Amino acid sequence: MERIEFLGSPMDSATMVDTVAYIASRIEKKEFLQHVVVNVAKLVHMQKDKVLAESVKACDLINIDGMGVVLGARFMGHDIPERVAGVDLFHNLLDMSRDKNFPVFLLGAEEDIVAKTVEKVNEQHKGINVVGYHHGYFWDDEAAVVEKIKESGARLLFVAITSPKKENFINKWQDQLGVDFVMGVGGTFDVVAGKVKRAPLWMQKNGLEWFYRIVQEPRRMWKRYAVTNSLFAWLLIKEKFK
């Protein structure tokens, strides 16, 4: 894997296969690995949110999730083999965890969503060892949740909380979680539980998942994507002319 610098953020140019193999090797050695994915929205927010930027930069592995970032980095001359989407990586890591008998913990989303996610994970990855889960609304007593994760004996922790909360939570508590691997997975639990439908494969490959989200939730999503996509295009133009 090659680490590059793009729009002020480090990120790793890697395939899905290489990413999973690298994570597995670190867990087997019990070498802690903090993981994050970057997409267009996160790159844009990192320009002004210094806490988020530092939390991302502190990660050991930074995958590119989002065809906008893949295409933008290629436009700037970087060799990016493929997109490593967070939801796809989540499922690949669950398969790896089942095969290697690594226990996992799921954290985030609403209570019914994370419970449904655990149910779906057990159905889709038969034999996996889910040793615990907790909803994502625990900010009045973070330490108690951290202790619950530690006591579970989990080796992998998946955190489905919105940015920048998840990045900052992981960065703050990483030394006390007791896990070997932690990954922020954003809205992945909503997808797995069936609350949100994922875009068709052809839209994923052509960088149109943002448009699919707007069609699903036009009132909530159109402004977010209009602003972030416009700012990203402007940042890209400025970077190119440098």
Image (spheres, rainbow, N blue to C red):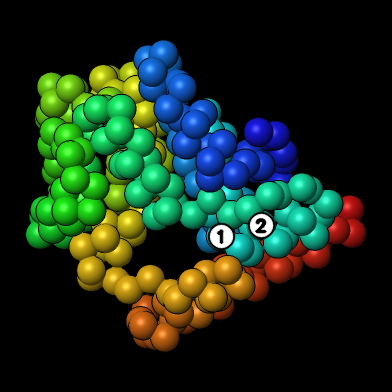
Residue 218 locus on image (x, y percent): 39, 85
Residue 115 locus on image (x, y percent): 11, 53
**Hey, what amino acid is under mark 2?**
Val
Residue 12 locus on image (x, y percent): 63, 39
Judge from the rendering whether residue 108 lies leftward or rightward of residue 95; answer left or right.
left
Judge from the rendering whether residue 29 lies leftward or rightward of residue 66; answer left or right.
left
Identify the residue shown where x is 65% and y is 33%: 1
Identify the residue shown where x is 56% and y is 36%: 18
User: Which residue is at the front of the view, 75 or 89?
Assistant: 89
Judge from the rendering whether residue 215 lies leftward or rightward of residue 153; answer left or right.
right
User: Which residue is at the front of the view, 157 or 232?
Assistant: 157
Residue 60, placed above or below residue 13 = above
Q: Which mark is residue 78?
A: none
Q: Are marks 1 and 2 in contact (CB under 8 Å)?
A: yes
Residue 11 visible to the viewer: no
Identify the residue shown where x is 26% and y is 20%: 178
Residue 119 visible to the viewer: yes
Describe the element under mark 2 as helix, strand or loop. helix
Residue 163, placed above or below residue 28 = below
Residue 92 in which image quadrant: top left
The residue that disc 1 covers is: 66
The residue that disc 2 covers is: 70
Judge from the rendering whether residue 95 lies leftward or rightward of residue 151; answer left or right.
right
User: Which residue is at the front of the view, 202 or 208?
Assistant: 202
Describe the element under mark 1 as helix, strand or loop. loop
